[in-house]
Image (cartoon, helix red, strand yellow):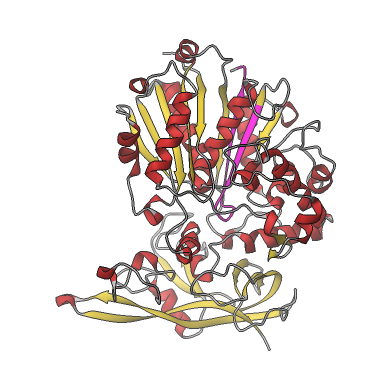
Amino acid sequence: MAERKACIIAGGMDRWGVREASIVDLAQEAAKDCFDDVPALKKEDIDGFLFASSYCGRTSFQVNPAPVMAERIGLKPTSICSRLDTLCAGGSSGIILATGLIRSGMADVVMVAGGEKLYTPQRWETYYSEMASIDHDWDGAQGMGLPPPFFSMTAQDHMKRYGTTKEQLAAVSVKNRRNGANNPNAQFQKEVSLEEVMAARPVVPPLGLFDCTPITDGCAAVILTHEDKAKELSDRPLVYVRGTAQASLHSMSMNWNGESLADWVHLRAAAKRAYEQARVKPEDIDVAQTHDCFTISEIVEMEDLGFCKKGEGGPFVESGQNDFGGKVPVNTDGGLLSCGHPFGATGLRQAREMLFQLQGRAIRQVEGAKIGLAHNLSGLNVEHTILIYGREP
Amino acid sequence: MPVPGVPILDGLYPSTLDLYPLEAKEFNRIHQFYENLRENRFTTTKCKKCGTTPFPPRVVCPKCNSDDLEWVDLPTKGKVLRFTEEVAGVPHGFDSPLIHARIELEDGSKLICRIANCQAGELKEGVAVRLFAYEVPPMIVEKRGGVMEEVPRMFFAFEPVK
């Protein structure tokens, strides 16, 4: 059998933020929004279900969540029903796997859902639980589970080596908060000015409050299927998964591969593979969603994804080259800095925005976008995941 | 923990919330690392077959797959390359300021670790640091007959050389 082509056909998400709901509630809301997005599709059409969540075992005391969520949503999967955890990239991992299953014929219509309920009844446990996100025995015991210190050092390395300024970091926050200002699903829907970002209370200098993504409850879901089924279900333009990559070259803060913390060898490795698979170059990307967990992250990503030269990420973002009207609009729905970051759901939110952008129905539309890139960074920068979508296979 | 909680959990030790490694030999094949810390030694495993010396220690060589490994000493002195002082949002179990640094050991290897015995504003790039091994709360391990035994534990940070 010739390999089939995988398409993303629907995307949904719920309101993200501090939610008065359980993860089981949130999964149902996101799945409903996703089904509402493609009315011709019936729940019985779904034969595969992947659920991406990192913290359900910790903050919801629920391991093996996939059968629970499938039952609540009303799905009866027969090809796969499984949980995924790659922390911040769980949703994207699900899309990679669903693509492989669909291309090979092992599955036909797959829902990839995911998300987190991170806020526990007592807040100390919310922050304490975050410590589980890194190499437990070596980094957790150093108090390194919360990422701001690591990214603070990354920012310091970038500033000292390339002259990047705090204003340039702030420019990322201003842009992404502006992009999220009219996104009804975002945790923050209010713009911030450069002055407000600069004057915000420090978290870990040089990073201030608006340089960091918040802790977020929320779920999202997408549906993928093969080209023929996609044509049958919707008249909208087809959006293909063209290229995928996921790279992990070290497992912990003690075996960093880069020359400095601002040198992301594993991101370049993932990007090379994804671009090759998708048969595109960085300059072909019309719109991108990159992992802006911190403002410095987006700056390094612009460089190591090849949108600008190494070291030029600061001026690139300051001059609006990653904004509407620039070289490549990035985080058009507000990114993590506006939407928040319920780990397993973030890749799915990005996929939903890519689908909407490439079908010409995004809230803040990049005119004529045909090729899009989504990127996640996981944990204490241990893994990079890339998906490239296109209107052509 | 001074918070109200689930009555049936009162007085119990939830190892799933333990920030420190389960170091006891019944739970950990590299428990020697922690025992060496007690003698202020910073150690790892070296492969006797191919010489690979990774950190952290292993039970199988990641390069050649041999399980014939020996314990060797790493430098206990280094210098600060970059550091951060976390003042807000310091997690349970750590004091503010929570200071982390990327340090370079005397053999050129680099790692990120906590800096102990240091006040906010005191650390500078380039200053000398040394290993600081310290006692952490014991594991409570159930032995035969349901007897609960406290197993002492060590962990490490680095501290400024004063």
- The prevailing secondary structure element of the residues shown in magenta is strand
In the rendered image, the residue lying farthest to the bottom is B162
In the rendered image, the residue lying farthest to the left is B145
Q: Nearer the viewer, residue B46 or B90?
A: B90
Point out the image quarter for the N terminus of chain A: top left
Is A293 on the left-hand or right-hand side of B15?
A: right
Whole-percent x, y for residue A41 in the image: 42, 18
Q: Is residue A173 visible?
A: yes
Task: Identify the image quadrant of residue A391.
Answer: top right
- Does the stretch in magenta take in A373? yes
Is A323 on the left-hand or right-hand side of B75?
A: right
Residue at position x 68%, y 89% in the image: B162
Whole-percent x, y for residue A94 in the image: 46, 36
Residue at position x 58%, y 26% in the image: A355
> For the image shown, how many numbered marks are present on the structure?
0
Is A216 on the left-hand or right-hand side of A360?
A: left
The residue range painted magenta reads A372-392
Is A293 on the left-hand or right-hand side of A7?
A: right
